[in-house]
Amino acid sequence: ANEVIGYAAIEDITSVVGVEVTLPETVSVTYTNTTKEQKKVTWDTSKLDITKIADYTVKGTVEGTEDEVQVVVHIVLILHQYRLHMQK
């Protein structure tokens, strides 16, 4: 049988406080026969508070499975705030 062997890691998302976060709609799935496909993810955003500066781990369920994937969301005051002092 062609089984799921893994899901691609989802890159962290950085968003400005108060701005709606767009989470990826799909995740890349790899099967035992090495084929890949995109599957829809249903995210549980109940613990994501875009009004508070913090790091959140948001979990999602992959369509047609009970498998969980996750993405880390960084809510920041301003984008690139960490890079500004690197350029001197």
Image (tube, rainbow, N blue to C red):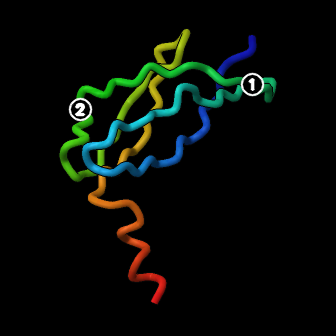
In depth, the one of 23 and 20 nearer the eye is 20
In depth, the one of 26 and 5 nearer the eye is 26
Q: Are marks 1 and 2 in contact (CB under 8 Å)?
A: no
- In the picture of the structure, the residue carrying the numbered disc 2 is 47
Measured Cα–Cα span from mark 1 to mark 2: 34 Å
Residue 28 lies left or right of residue 22; in this view the side is right
Query: What amino acid does circle 1 point to?
Result: Thr
In the current view of this chain or complex, which residue is farthest to the bottom? 88
Q: How far across and down, in percent of the image, does residue 6 sit?
A: 62, 31
Query: What amino acid does circle 2 point to?
Result: Lys
Identify the mark at residue 32; answer none if there is no mark: 1
- Name the image quarter holding the C terminus: bottom left
Q: Is residue 35 above or below residue 2?
A: below
Residue depicted at 47% across the width and 30% down the height: 69
Q: How far across and down, in percent of the image, does residue 39 sit?
A: 61, 20
In depth, the one of 62 and 80 nearer the eye is 80
